[in-house]
Image: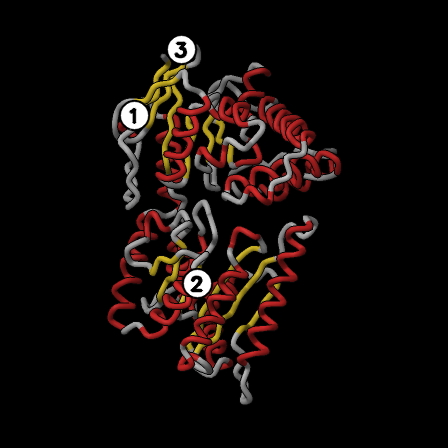
Amino acid sequence: TGGDDGPGAAAAFAAAGHGAGYELRPVALSPAEQHGFYFGFSNEVLWPLFHDLQSHCNFDPGYFASYDAANARYAASVAAVAGPADRIWVHDYHLMRVRAHLRRLGCHAPAAFFLHIPFPPPDIYVKLPWRRELLEALLEYDLVAFQTPRDRRNFLDCLRILLPGVALAGRGQPVVLARAARGDVRVGRFPIGIDFDRFEREAGHPDTIAAAEALRRELRGRQVVLGVDRLDYTKGIPERLLAFGAALDRHPELRERVTLIQVVVPSRERIPQYQGLKERVETLVGQINGRFTRPGGWVPIHYVFRQLAPHELVAYYRAADIGLVTPLKDGMNLVAKEYAACQTDGDGVLVLSEFAGAAAELREPALLVNPYAIDDVAAALWRACTMEPAERRQRMARIRRTVRRHDVFWWVESFLRAAFAADLSAFPQPADHVHGPPVQRLRSR
């Protein structure tokens, strides 16, 4: 957080956590610390690199020092309240070095780490100047967990190359790294889920149904294609717009029959690359609408640049005939799962990037696309728009079964069981369709 960590901030956090079953405590960061730690190392180094977009990286030498100092600050806050019987769960790329600092502070409570974003392959990861420091910091945790088999495999490949003092053997989940001094490190994958029942319940609420029907009336019954994204260059929004324009160009029969609603949630607008992305998106929307808009009220793209209220978002999900989820790279992408949960009539089609983590679970019933291949995405859009109702329902039913089974409660329970259970048989074996090599145990040489 910014600002001070005095009584006012502590009171505000206490109020926010009241009744939720947990307590919130602020970690104060000065503007300079925010710049170096959050806007700098986290979002100008790790975020683009881990999404295979190293050309966006700014390897400023001062950023890592800020990142490490901020991680030490978080570790001190945890150590002040954690006892030996507590369990510590650290989330995401911003805080990879927290456990290393906890050990220096004498806090040895069991700790696990979950990475929400992808982990890059070795040929990209090795470009990071602080590559060993981060790998060694991750190996301080008792469990290091990823979204997909691909991400776990990339991590293990990086260990092989950069920390050659370990050998791999065995099969199944988890991978175990034997550390002579500090015990084993477990390495697993746990695809994050959503609260399926809540989304389904809200989608079936009479107010949501009425809002979705009103939206469809405003669009005069045309098929609705929906994209929902945070403003970020990893989401593939310009490529998606180009693909939609290409579909209208190649398939004139779609004109005046299909409308794309593209929701973009403002994010990180202080970073120059994000300002440029916003300008490019708005230019493309204007160009495509300028080319294809026809008298009588049809505008091909409805562009919404704001945060939707939860009930609005669910209404959009329910109204959409096609969910268009085409990130260039994503750890999971919960929009795909939220869209499916809200398709209570079972009639939607999901067009999904093969580079989204969700593709590991949904690759067969979804229409998988390479978001860089504009013509292929355009062809998938045409197929989705012309798909027979029976096939639509069969595909969506399979997606919904998977999303319901691996919901957020399954994710939390399976992660905690795997992180802290003594018996490795507690590790879940999530169903997926991405199979890596049977390399499963790491041992010191």
Residue 394, percent from left and from top = 25, 64
- Residue in the image at 37% along x and 60% along y: 340
The secondary element bearing badge 2 is classed as: strand
Depth check, front residue: 10 or 228: 228
Disc on the earlier residue, 3 or 1:
3
Q: Whole-percent x and y of residue 223?
A: 42, 76
Tell whether label 1 touches label 2 (CB within 8 Å).
Answer: no
Q: Residue tagged by mark 2?
A: 324
Question: The C terminus is located in which quarter?
Answer: top left
The residue at 37%/17% (across/down) is: 178
Residue 201 or residue 289, whichever sits in front:
289
* Residue 200 in view in this figure: no
* Displayed quadrant of residue 190: top left
Mark 2–mark 1 distance (CA, rounded to whole Å):
39 Å
Seen at 28% across and 62% down, the residue is 395
Write down the quadrant of residue 371 in the picture.
bottom left
Mark whose residue sits in front, 2 or 1: 2
Q: Position of residue 201 (x, y in %)?
A: 40, 61
Residue pointed to by mark 3? 180
Q: Which mark is residue 424?
A: 1
